[in-house]
Amino acid sequence: MTIKSRLPLAILACLVCISGVAATADAAAVGAYTTKDTLSFVSAPTLHPPKFTIDVTPGKSKLAPGYFMIANFKDLTSSSPMNGQGGPLILDHEMRPVWVDPAPTNVYTLNLTTQRFGGKPALSWWEGVLNAQGVIQSGEDFVANQQYKTVATLKGADGWTLTFHEFLISGNNAWVTANKFVSGVDLTAFGGPANGTIIDSAVQEYNLKSGALEYTWDAEQHIPLTESVTTAAAKNATSPADAWDAYHINSIDLAGGDEFLVSMRNTWGAYLVNASTNQIVWTLGTQHNDSFTLGPKAAFEWQHDVQLHGTNEVSMFDDACCDLSGVGPLAQPSGPSRGLVLNLNTTAHTATVEAQYLHSPTLDTATQGNTQLLSNGNVLVGWGSSPYLTEYSKSGKALLDAIFPEGPDISYRVYDESWTGTPSYPPSGAGRTQGSKTTIYASWNGATQVAKWEVLGGPSSKRLSKAATVNKGGFETAIALAHGYQLYQVDALDSKGHVLGRSKTFKAVKGKITKPPTGHGY
């Protein structure tokens, strides 16, 4: 299956998501969705996640352990509704949903991943509110525990707005990306006005419990505007709606030793910074005064998700596309997008290609994307505004290639993470009768330890007995019964037969009996 290029829409979407600006936008329509190419469940009728297609059949034994973490959202410039609900979404290796958390229809929800908070596993993601012009009014990071209860939230301080690009928990603190509009900047040397406005970028550290801002590293104070590969001449640049996005911060990696690595999309640069001194230790990929000489095919453009592994290995998503400044026609890609791993020789000051991961057919991803080096040596590439995710062996063989339903759905990043979900709410059950047949449907949104479902039936809630026990299927399991009862209950069992949770009692109703489809996406 091949989805046609969405490059023009993706470029416009980048202006919304990154600069906080769009020519036209309807915030209320951000989360509008259709049930076309989505999944529906008898026992969870309010959930309609998108249905993914798998191009490359997964070799399960070769995939890294864990679940795929996605937060799908709508390309705001598209007039079409999303295919399914947007929001945090956990999928198994068959691309079947494990946890579905529909987002409010007036927000973007991005960057779902796992963290540790208070010494325990947690999930985190970003939500942002936009006005009718597409300007980001606020951004907030959320943390949820294994019971899917929100345990922390974080908003920006001192005029900074938290962006979705990074949220890293370290102890009781969180490191985040943030933007601020700065006015009164002389941009005449860059083709802009004397009283211009830029979008400044920052790495910040907050106390996650109190919300107090403890540290800010401000790009404008440490990276000259001459480093930007975009131009202020794109717009009048005198107001926030026309501000020059000179830096565009899009990732942070805590490198240890009081250092962090930060990526600036619009300088084509990654910067290793000493947080104690605020000084830049080295730069990689910048067009002026780069610390490294790039070897053949090592140059990158408009990169995302730059991560440092040890002291001499850097991974990133090389978009190789595109100048979104708005000057002249839409810029063309300089090459296909790719997952990229570079080896740094800090003595000779060279950077050479260690590995690259290309999609087949090749993709031109205008915005977003990530490259994750997995624990078993595999590499996961999320293709950002190109609606794919691919897991490769270390040698570059595609082990799994999955596709969003064709439509405006996209995702900022995709992760493969270990996760154990133990919902605080009970399982869900529903029953359908058709003629003499009865089928019970069972699901438990977010539960990862369910191995079997047991159906109890009887004349009342106090007189229930075991009617059937079956292995868990996908998100929802259909259980055919030999005969019907007045009342039902479903129990979720672990691999040893222990009861993990019980549904409320329910009655079966007349209706069409359907079986969950087999194969991918359910």
Image: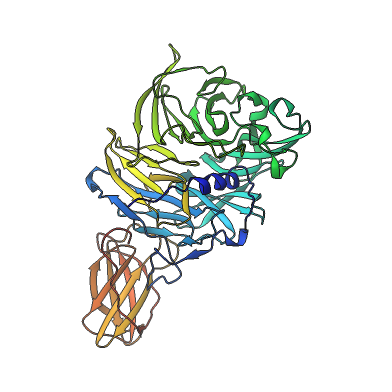
Point 56% across, 58% down: residue: 30
Q: Quadrant of the C terminus?
A: bottom left
Using the rendered view, name the quadrant where residue 96 is placed.
Answer: bottom left
Q: In the drawing, does residue 132 fall left or right of residue 345?
A: right
Point 32% across, 47% down: residue: 401
Residue 452 screen position, x and y as percent: 26, 65
Do we see residue 441 in this rendering?
yes
Q: In the drawing, does residue 54 fall left or right of residue 218?
A: left
Residue 345 screen position, x and y as percent: 41, 16
Q: In the drawing, does residue 175 fall left or right of residue 423?
A: right
Residue 419 vertical placement versus 320 (above, below): below
Do we see residue 464 in this rendering?
no
Residue furthest toward the top? 348
Circle count: 0
Identify the colour scheme used: rainbow
Point 42% across, 36% down: residue: 337
Q: Nearer the viewer, residue 132 or 392?
A: 132
Residue 141 screen position, x and y as percent: 57, 48
Residue 443 vertical placement versus 211 (above, below): below
Residue 380 screen position, x and y as percent: 36, 40
Q: Nearer the viewer, residue 210 or 130?
A: 130
Point 33% across, 70% down: residue: 442
Using the rendered view, name the quadrant where residue 435 is placed.
Answer: bottom left
Q: Nearer the viewer, residue 223 or 235?
A: 235
